[in-house]
Image (cartoon, rainbow, N blue to C red):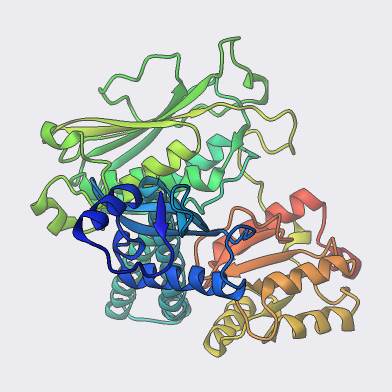
Amino acid sequence: TPIPLNKPPKLSKQTQSQAASRHGASLVSRFVDAEVGRKVLQELQTNVKHNQGTVDDLNHILNLEAMLHTHQGPRWSAIQLRPGRDPVTGDPVILFSARDKSDAVKARQEREAREQKSEFLAIMAHEIRTPLHQVTGFIDLLDQTQLNTEQRSYIKLLKSSAQGLMTVISDVLDYSKLEAGKMKLEKIPYEPFSVVEGSMEVVRTSCEEKGIRLDLGWDKAIPFKLLGDPNRLRQVLLNLLSNSVKFTQKGGDIHVQVTTIEEEEFSTQQQPQQQPELPSKESSSFSSKPRPMVKFVVRDTGVGIAEEHLSMIFNNYYQGNVSVARTHGGTGLGLSICKLLVMKMGGTIGVSSQLHKGSSFWVCLPADVPQEGPENGADGTVQDEDPAEQVQLNILVAEDNNVNQKLVKRMLEGMGHRATIVANGVEAIERVESTKGRGVDLVLMDIQMPVMDGLEATRRLRTMGYVSLPIFGLTASVARSDYRELGFDDWLPKPIPRKDLNLKLRQLKKQNGHLPSVIERQ
């Protein structure tokens, strides 16, 4: 559409009408934000004046996005403007074209808003988690001292409250990262039996306290090893198991069944409790059906879910019963996170339930089998420590927070190790270099530090030749699935759980055969 470039002269009403029919509305009036229109017009006029008023040879093209008035109302448009001449009168005009892109702009704005929210929540979660981790860490240290019965009951309540708060923070942050598409998944060999058994062990104490029977049924046809993200599978299973424990009354039952998708589901009738049959290395193949699946079922005899709530149970912030939600708490995000994680892993999730009789949640995931992987014990678990693993370790801790420094030093010394504390990545590199790595068995590297953060320090250590030096990333945020790409051998949450550290050390030794300087000292 040609639009007059210069201020038009005074014309009769008839002439104005004829011009309007040919030229359309003025440039400024087309913009929802008139100030944007005025700036565009001024830029084009200035360009023409700079070129002594000639428009024939001008190649000045102005591209922008703005909201224009349309017959559909205000719409975002991709606009192109350039000076030209009216083909009838030869007068200077603006050649104007616009293409509607409201849907694309809206999608981009929503994506940017999700990313900004994710970044904001990540920062806030780190600021909240750091003092909370310190609280839980010192609670653990206090629990190891001599306490009377009343004091120990207080410690138990403190642990429960802190863990509840941590769960809420983790749920909000996980959902935000999934919503923004920023959560990466691993694709590594893992032992499904070990993941399932480990998840059940986490809730077993709670089951025993409520008198809930917890048992497992295992299909021998399931491969000994699968390919996927064991941490995210564990997160999903723990959420389902925790919900079952939460909503199952005293004396109830929780049954976990893991089977191939081709087999029929177990009957809802509970079987006598017995040890599950362990997977064998010989039973690691499927029939020749396309893309076999493994089905994980968590069935309980809890309060159940009303039929009218089943279709919404995986919605964000949804809790099926207000009175039950008040009793048991929670954010209502757990199942929606499970759904997003399972979908991201290429699987499906569902539920069947009867009110007052119980619920059955199931997850189906692809049974991708790795070509090869490290051999483990026949029961799918890491074997007990050998004498070499029980040697006192020299552990270098890079941590800038003073309270965290005291906490981790006391914890490591309580485990029988020697801890050297540095405050940033530069000091960590200097310490490793001073001993050429021989005086350091393991580096616990905080990811966020001043001067030089843990990511950069780890990258520099690797490029300096310390490729076999075990480095664990420490984070008060969520687990990073890309830690290997960043140069870390593994990661640990803060504060460092004693059991997790011991398990990581055993796994590390099993993979590498030894811890570098430990063997030299023996």
**Residue 355 rendering spot, x and y as whole percentages:** 11, 34
Q: Residue furthest bottom?
A: 402
Percent of width and height locating residue 404: 55, 83
Location of residue 92 with respect to 9 vertically, above or below: above
Q: Judge by depth and name the residue closer to the eye, 143 or 165.
A: 165
| Vertical comparison of 161 with 350: above or below | below
Q: Report the quarter where the C terminus lies.
A: bottom right
Q: Is residue 276 above or below residue 393?
A: above
Q: Position of residue 324 (x, y in %)?
A: 13, 51
Camera-nearest residue between 37 and 22? 22
State left or right for residue 97 relative to residue 56: left
Q: Is residue 154 left or right of residue 348?
A: left
Is residue 243 at all visible to an observer of this figure? yes
**Looking at the rendering, which quadrant does residue 459 occupy?**
bottom right
Q: Is residue 118 left or right of residue 379?
A: left
| Foreground of the two, 8 or 384 | 8
Q: Residue 112: name its quadrant.
A: bottom left
